[in-house]
Every structure is written in structure tokens, then in C-alpha cells.
Image (spheres, grey):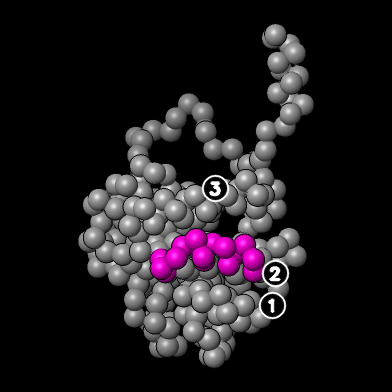
Amino acid sequence: MLVEVCANSLESALVAERAGADRIELCSELAVGGLTPSYGLLKAVKEQVSIPVHVLIRPRSGDFTYSDAEFDIMLTDIALCKELGFEGVVSGVLNKSFTLDVERTRKLKSSAGDLTFTFHRAFDWVKDPFRTLKQLDDLQISYILSSGQQKSALLGIDLLSDLKLQNSRVQIMPGSGINAGNVELFKKKGFSIVHLSGTAMTETLSKAPLISMISSGFLSDDHKAVTKLENIKAVMNKVK
């Protein structure tokens, strides 16, 4: 069984390699499900990590529908990953109806070229997972990362197992909440790969800061924060 570790930093990537992980999914901001890592992190990991690395291509938190400008950014990020020599990318696009955006996902796959392509956990939002599996098979996607449309892969193991039994070339990669206490179950079920972060919170300060910089109001699955024209113009009118 292969083990893919979701690493959110250079430190995490190096630890994963040292622990014997087979592959890394590199991202930032685990708290929102992961975002595309910075150029600096990409470059550092490529220079210092020797095991295969697949890069998450997700330009913002929230849902998996994107504007034309956001989609162009995703294509640019994939081009950068190819230029830097990474082995794969992890991405995907949905429609607002919670169906696969076939055309945009096809464009992402085409842009990735020979890079291994994993369709990420947007799969856990689709209305018809079996139809979506067939569509992703037709697009020659290599992996689907999924929790079986549940809060954890353990809770979703029945759907994951049913998906694995379909006549598909796409490999089902269980992820979310996998650890040493339950990974053997996935191996017994016949899965060839699992995905986990293996993280633990590490203290960075000896005491709490004066104020918190965490703004929970920006965290949403169905909204995104966008600068509002009227808000900025109102301020400009006051000072100019």
C-alpha cells in the first residue's frame, strides 16, 4: 500500500520523507482544506525533497466553482509545476449544481500533460459519485481523493469500497482522518493507496499574543470574500 502525506510546509514535507512516505501532496492552509502553495515553498520542496510530490491547485478557499480569472490562475500554476519538474497535480472543478465541470476539468488535465492528475475532495460534494467516477475515468484521471462523502474516510468506507469495485481505471484514494489506528482496515479492504496529513499542533509561542489574527468570518464553504467597490470608494471619498 502506498502512503501519500499531505504536507503544508517544507518542514512537514521533510518529516514525511524521513518517515518513509511514498509521496507528498503539497499545499498550504490545511484549515480551509488546502490551497496552492507559494512559489517559494514549491521551489524549496523541489530542491530538498526527493520523493514524488503532487501539488494542490486550488486558488482560494470555499467552493470549487471558479471565475474565468481564477481558472486562468489555476492553469498558470499548473504550468509552473511542470516547469519546476513536479510529478503531479491535484485539482478539479465543479458546477454550481454539484456536478463535475467536465470541460474545465478536461482543460486542467490537458494543461497538466504527462503529470499525474488527482481529482481532489471536491468529489465529496458531487450528487452522483458513480456517474462522476465514470466521467473522470473518461478524462483519464489517475486518482480520486475522497472521504466517501462523509466527515472521515472511516465513516465513508462503504461508498469508497463500492467505488473501488467499479470497472474503472481511476484509483480511489481514501483520505480524511486516516491514522495508525485505522489504516489496516483500508488495506484489508483492498485499497492500494491512502492519504493522510499525520499532523499535530506544535506550539510556536510561549504565551498567547495580545490579539488573535484569525478571522472566522472569512471561513465559508459557500461564500468567498471579495473586495467591495462601494466600500473602497466610500473611504477614498473621505480622504481624497
What residue did someone put label 3 on? 73
Whether residue 172 is visible here, answered yes or no, is: no
- Please name which of the two marks, 1 or 3, marks the residue nearer to the observer: 3
State how far apart marks 3 and 2 are (Cα).
22 Å
Residue closest to the eye, 222 or 104? 104
- Left or right of 15? Residue 220 is right
Between label 3 and label 2, give the one nearer the viewer: 3
What's drawn in magenta, residue-wise? 102-116
Is any atom of residue 70 visible in this view? yes
Query: In x, y percent, where is residue 10?
Result: 31, 49
Secondary structure state at the residue bearing disc 3: helix
- Residue type at mark 1: give it: Asp
Label 1–label 2 contact, CB within 8 A: yes
Q: Which numbered disc, 3 or 2, marks the residue that appears first in the sequence?
A: 3
Three-letter amino acid code of the residue under disc 3: Ile
Instruction: Give the amino acid at mark 2.
Output: Thr
Q: Which residue is mark 2?
A: 99
